[in-house]
Image (spheres, rainbow, N blue to C red):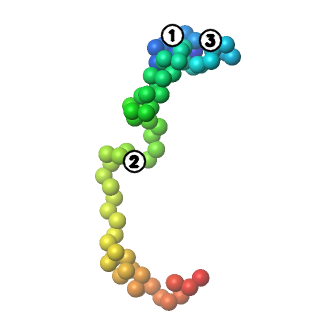
Amino acid sequence: MKVNCPTCKTSVEWNQASPFRPFCSKKCQLIDLGEWADEQKAIPCGPSKDAEMSQLPDIEEIEAMLSEQSDDFFKQ
């Protein structure tokens, strides 16, 4: 089977004789690694770092909510 190198698009034979598969060479493999390290490539997972942070309640609000709970709420 033949695949295209993700970096330079050269055709690469996908077998044991191609040690850098799917890349055609160590150079193309390192270029790709550098792109991941520089965060030019990323796997999306949740909100981006540019997304607005959600507001957490203040400690006073948390204390007020807890004070409204019955005594049984705090027992196991």
Residue name at image x 48 percent, y 88 percent: 70
- Image position of 5 with respect to 32: above or below: above
Amino acid at circle 2: Pro
Q: Which amino acid type is shown beneath numbered disc 1?
A: Thr
Measure the C-alpha gap from mark 2 to mark 1: 35 Å
- Quarter holding residue 67: bottom left
Sequence-wise first label, 2 or 1: 1
Residue 47: which numbered mark, if any?
Answer: 2
Label 3 vs label 2: CA separation? Answer: 38 Å
Residue 27 in picture, x, y percent from top left: 48, 17
Name which residue lies at 53% across and 88% down: 72
Q: Nearer the viewer, residue 1 or 10?
A: 10
Q: Can see residue 22?
A: yes
The three-letter amino acid code for the residue at tag 3 is Glu
Q: In the picture, which quadrant includes the N terminus?
A: top right
User: In screen coordinates, is 15 left or right of 72?
Assistant: right
- Mark 2 closeness class: few <14, some 14–19, many ≥20 residues within 10 Å: few
Front in this rendered view, residue 27 or 7: 27
Residue 22 position in % (x across, y down): 57, 19
Residue at mark 1: 10
- Tell me, yes or no, whether the two marked residues, 2 and 1, touch with CB atoms within 8 Å: no
Between marks 3 and 2 in the image, the one whose residue lies nearer the viewer: 3
| Pointer 3 or 2: first along the chain | 3
